[in-house]
Image (cartoon, rainbow, N blue to C red):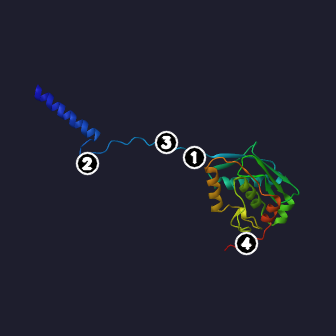
Amino acid sequence: MFPTRLVAAVLGGIVALVLVGVGAPGAAAAPAAPAAPQRAAVQTTIYYDSSRAAELAPQVDEAAEIWNTRVTSVKLVKGTAGITVITAQNGSAPGTASCVGCTRGQIYFYRNQIQQSGAAALRVIVHEFGHILSLNHPPDIGNCDKVMAGGRCQNAIPSAEEIAAVERFWARGWRPAKPGPNPADEREVLGAPALVTR
């Protein structure tokens, strides 16, 4: 009986070592512990109300979609209690935003000034949303490749540099908003001659 028990114990130990993979040359390692779940990136939602944007309302929605399809750290969503968008006949600039890098404020658009500026209306709208999303004017005013550079341009698509700047700003979490540019600056930027960049 004794040799049978000894053989059974030895065989049991060998089987246990093979199953666990301890000390057996070439044996597969024990399965790794499951990886800790990755923390989902935080996305800030900014609500905008275009009910007072009149005939520009469809382009306001289009401008929001232009930003939403290019950035992931922040999203513009139609709603209330956020950014109020208003269209009027005349004003001090084609468009103005009350703040830079904010979730609550106002954007104003002025029909006559948009027409006089020579810039595409959609470009002006994307530009003003750019302020809300944290962007200021770059030094190369009139560069049609950048929506924040204003100019008498048609391009309404933000540059890779502008997109990256928005992502960096909102990925770091909420920070106090800054006042928007003054209307005189907006008038000069949006009505500036287009630069030849190529």
Mark positioned earlier in the residue sequence (4 or 3): 3
Report if the CB atoms under discs 4 and 1 are less than 8 Å apart.
no
Where, quadrant-wise, is the N terminus in this rendering? top left
Report if the CB atoms under discs 1 and 3 are less than 8 Å apart.
no
Up-down relation of residue 168 to residue 11 (above or below):
below
Task: Identify the residue under disc 4.
Answer: 195
Query: Given the image, on which type of amino acid does mark 1 rest?
Result: Ala
Q: Position of residue 177 (x, y in %)?
A: 72, 49
Report if the CB atoms under discs 4 and 2 are less than 8 Å apart.
no
Q: Which mark is residue 26?
A: 2
* Residue nearer the viewer, 176 or 186: 176
Give the side of residue 20 with respect to residue 189, left or right: left
> How far separated are the C-alphas under marks 3 and 2?
31 Å
> How far separated are the C-alphas under marks 1 and 3?
12 Å
* Residue nearer the viewer, 175 or 146: 175
Please tell me which residue is depicted at 74% across the width and 59% down the height of the picture. Answer: 127
Task: Identify the residue under disc 3.
Answer: 37
Mark positioned earlier in the residue sequence (4 or 1): 1
Task: Identify the residue under disc 1.
Answer: 41
- The 10 Å Cα crowd at callout 2, few under 14, some 14 to 19, many 20 or more, is few
Q: Position of residue 35 (x, y in %)?
A: 44, 43
> How far separated are the C-alphas under marks 4 and 2?
67 Å
User: Which mark's residue is nearer the viewer, 4 or 2?
Assistant: 4
Query: Given the image, on which type of amino acid does mark 3 rest?
Result: Pro
Q: Secondary structure at mark 2?
A: loop
Q: Classify residue 187 by image quadrant.
A: bottom right
